[in-house]
Image (cartoon, helix red, strand yellow):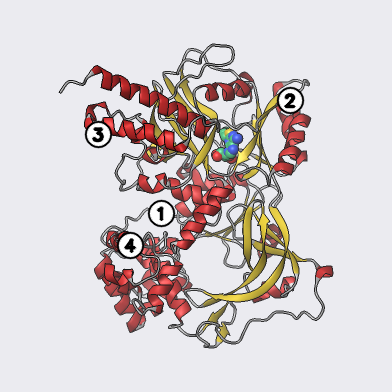
Amino acid sequence: MTLPDHIKAEAARLRTEIERHNRLYYVLDAPEVSDAEYDALLRRLVEIEEAHPALRTPDSPTQRVGAVPAEQFAPVRHTIPMLSLANAMDPEEALAFDARVKRFLETEEEIVYVAEPKLDGLSVELVYEEGVLTVGSTRGDGVTGEDVTANLRTVKSIPLRLSPVAKAMGDESPVPRRLEVRGEVLITRDDFERLNESRDAEGEEPFANPRNAAAGSLRQLDPAVTASRPLDGFFYAIGQVEEDSYPDNQWELLDWLKGLGLKINPLCRRCSGIEEALDFYRYLLGKREEIPYEIDGMVVKVDRFDLRGKLGNTARSPRWAIAAKFPPEQARTVVEEITVQVGRTGKVTPVAHLSPVRVGGVMVSRATLHNQDEVARKDVRIGDTVVIQRAGDVIPEVVEVIPDRRPEGSQAWSMPAKCPVCDAGIIRVEGEAAHRCSNMACPAQVKTRIFHFASRGAMDIEGLGRKTVSQLVDLGKVSLPSDLAALSKEDVLELELFADKSAENFVKAIEEAKGSRTADRLLFGLGIPMVGQVGAKLLMARFKTFEELSGATEEQMLDIHGIGPEIAGQVVSFFAEPVNLAEAEKLWETFRPQQVAGAVKDDLAGKTFVLTGALEGYTRDEAKAAIEKLGGKVTGSVSKRTDYVVAGADPGSKLAKAEELGIKVLGEDEFVEMLGENK
Ligand code: IVH
């Protein structure tokens, strides 16, 4: 069928019009039409494309969510590696950075810098070919990322097609033949709170912070899920560019990117000399709470690209830029109550319930108190005014008590003698910091065990949040993880908050976990004490079937590099219990896990690391991820069981402790060497 010209023309006109409104709304924050008018345009375009599918082009605004769910993300090698930034922990270090730059460039003149907020999101790279978005990837390890093109296409502030905007001067930037552009994907604080509220209402586990929410949303196998999340972003750098001429400095680059329709951060400043950059640092710090998204510092970049070329890079970060970090966000509030939470292994953790307080823009009403010894050491009491802190990805914690604000007659807190959930005794095992509920059938334990089984690192069953699990257990629908397999839509419809469609999806999510998850996930999901994701991988790489695993002796397990007597002992005694063996057998039969390939690097596998101080080339999370990828484990405190302490700049008391215990300390270089080419 030939297409009438007027239809073609209308589709083209609608596309241009919709793209223009997209940009006005999502990139420039200056909409010209109402939502209803915009929707009408989009609906008309959908209508035309449905009638004439030949008109449907991949860069059409109707095609943001077109792709089907992926099995896994394909690797994408970045043409130019995506480096990390070295950190400056205080203004002095920023001055030292400036001095270094001058020394290197053999100049005494002030350097022109561009200072930008350091966005606490997820870095991504987009590739535009002839102006059309073709590939979008995550940073990954810097060299190879994951192909998340379909997901990035759903982000409304990311243009599917670059289109030059006429500038004030009248000239337009030509669209480059090929452009690799880099930036950060994030979720604003308001959107984050709304997202968590709706997750909470649906019984799903809330995200810990906006960064995790953005990461979780971008790394979804089903782009439709990503499309439903409020992702946003800013662009601030380029990779390889194929075009005859483009800017030769950062300040004009930002303007150029903006001119192509990419969203850039308006809070950037061109500074003559480091002092001006530090003024801007103080300004941003003061404004931090008003900024609608999270920033964890400021990035200072040498403006001129030719100077950047002279400065070059170290192994992991450019010499021409530094991240001046902000201190962790703290706030004062009152402890209204201290309760205890019972985990899946019965571990009882004290939790402070706080008068809700905004810490760096996120409402916090609970903070962990870790264990009885910690409560005693800080002497936290009900009624106390405390300083709480939220840094990066960690759960908020109580830093200290303000002694003069303590109300009269307050009493030191102590661990209750009985479990608040099942009334069984709370015990403390010799040598452990934790207290535990002694009753295996304690509903709190049962619920947490099922929740753990379904969690992301284990069987990854979407929609099985705490509330849903809690109702399923209370209604007697499940008491063991294996009971999940037999749940019907009718069972689920008895729960609050489930309607026809959501109940169907829920049952479907359980079905999907069958036959599609690896055996180490299932083993981890059993919740055997001491068996984490890494231990589970090591075990399942060695024992290929359930029979081999459940029949293995302690000696056989100890043969595996990385499995110590504690894990081996726990696994053997777990399977020695007939109830556990039967349950595990049933889970293996119904969920039919896939065999695990053995691929963990030997000298790191099973080793325990503690990180202290700031590393130049890695954030805490990156270092942790790199260690875990190779089969190692990262813990928070130094003990006899620690194998290595990795010490960066400004190490804390952990370094002293390591020296005291004679534990091997690695500098950053040694650490990088150990990670080797596996980085
Ligand atoms: S420039 C080679 N600018 O920080 C440095 N990075 O530690 C190129 N980041 O992975 C990055 N805001 O995810 C740059 N305004 C900004 C940034 C920024 C956040 C992140 C980025 C990068 C990490 C480096």
The residue pinned by badge 2 equals: 102
Residue 225 at x, y percent in the picture: 38, 49
Residue 341 position within the rendered picture, expressed as x and y whole percent measured from the top left? 55, 74
Question: In this picture, is 304 found above or below 151?
Answer: above
Residue position marked by numbered label 4 in the rendering: 506
Say which amino acid is labelled 4.
Phe
Q: Indicate the secondary structure of the residue bearing disc 2.
A: helix
* Comes first in the chain, label 1 or label 4: 4
Q: CA distance from mark 2 to mark 4?
A: 60 Å
Label 1 belongs to which residue?
600
**Mark in the foreground, 3 or 4:** 3
Is the residue under label 4 in contact with that under label 3 (CB below 8 Å)? no
Residue shown at 21% from the left, 21% from the top: 3
Crowdedness near tag 1: few (<14), some (14–19) or many (≥20) residues, C-alpha within 10 Å: many
Instruction: Label 1: state its secondary structure.
Output: loop
Task: Please state which of residues 470 and 546 is positioned toward the viewer in this rendering.
Answer: 470
Q: On the rendering, which quadrant does ligand 1 occupy?
A: top right
Q: Position of residue 222 (x, y in %)?
A: 35, 48
Query: Which dot, 2 or 1, sits closer to the camera?
Result: 2
The answer to which quarter of the image holds residue 550 is bottom left
**What is the secondary structure assignment of the residue under circle 3?**
helix
- What residue is shown at x 75% (from left), y 81% (from top)? 411
- Between the C-alphas of marks 2 and 1, the distance is 44 Å
Q: Nearer the viewer, residue 75 or 406?
A: 406
Q: Amino acid at mark 2?
A: Lys
Name the residue at the left extreme.
1
Question: Could you tell me if the residues under marks 1 and 3 are in contact, i.e. CB atoms within 8 Å?
Answer: no
Whichever of labels 2 and 3 marks the residue nearer the N terminus, that label is 3
Compare marks 2 and 1 and give the one earlier in the sequence.
2
Residue type of the residue flagged with mark 3: Glu
Work out how far the residue at label 3 is from the one at label 4, CA to CA, in angstroms. Answer: 31 Å
